[in-house]
Image (spheres, rainbow, N blue to C red):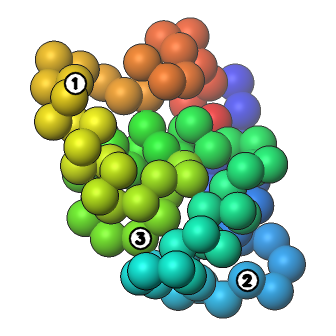
Amino acid sequence: MQDTHWTALAACGKGKLAPDALFVEGAAQREARAVCTSCPVRLACLADALDNRMDFGVWGGMTERERRALLRRRPEVRSWRTELVGSDAVEGV
């Protein structure tokens, strides 16, 4: 069992990225999404945002508009963590 929460491993938490750099609008979202491309915990991040209905920002490479559309298309999903990361996923990762 691993004690590290996925946020500690996130690409957006490393380097010189400002904390609010993922909470942008318009064309700046493209840059924010690029950070997520090679992130090792992208799916865990996205699952967390979907399960908690995060309204703002780029999470797991998806904008709020993309997440809302996905939630509308897949209302039957009860746990995005199970759907995206897997039921045997280690807590927090």
Mark 1 residue type: Arg
Q: Quadrant of the C terminus?
A: top right
Q: Is 19 placed above or below 83 here?
A: below
Query: x%, y% of residue 1?
Result: 70, 24
Asked whether disc 3 touches disc 2, contact meaning CB atoms under 8 Å apart, the reply is: no
Q: Is residue 35 left or right of residue 53?
A: right
Task: Please give the name of the residue rendered at 29% of the width and 37% of the height, measured from the top-left corner.
Answer: 70
Marks 3 and 1 sit apart, C-alpha to C-alpha, by 20 Å
Mark 3 residue type: Gly
| Count of marks placed on residues | 3
Residue highlighted by disc 2? 17
Residue 57 is tagged as 3
Query: x%, y% of residue 36?
Result: 67, 56
Is residue 4 in view from this perspective? Answer: no
Residue 34 is tagged as none
Is residue 19 in view from this perspective? Answer: yes
Q: Is 72 placed above or below 24 here?
A: above
Residue found at the far right of this picture? 15
Mark 2 residue type: Leu
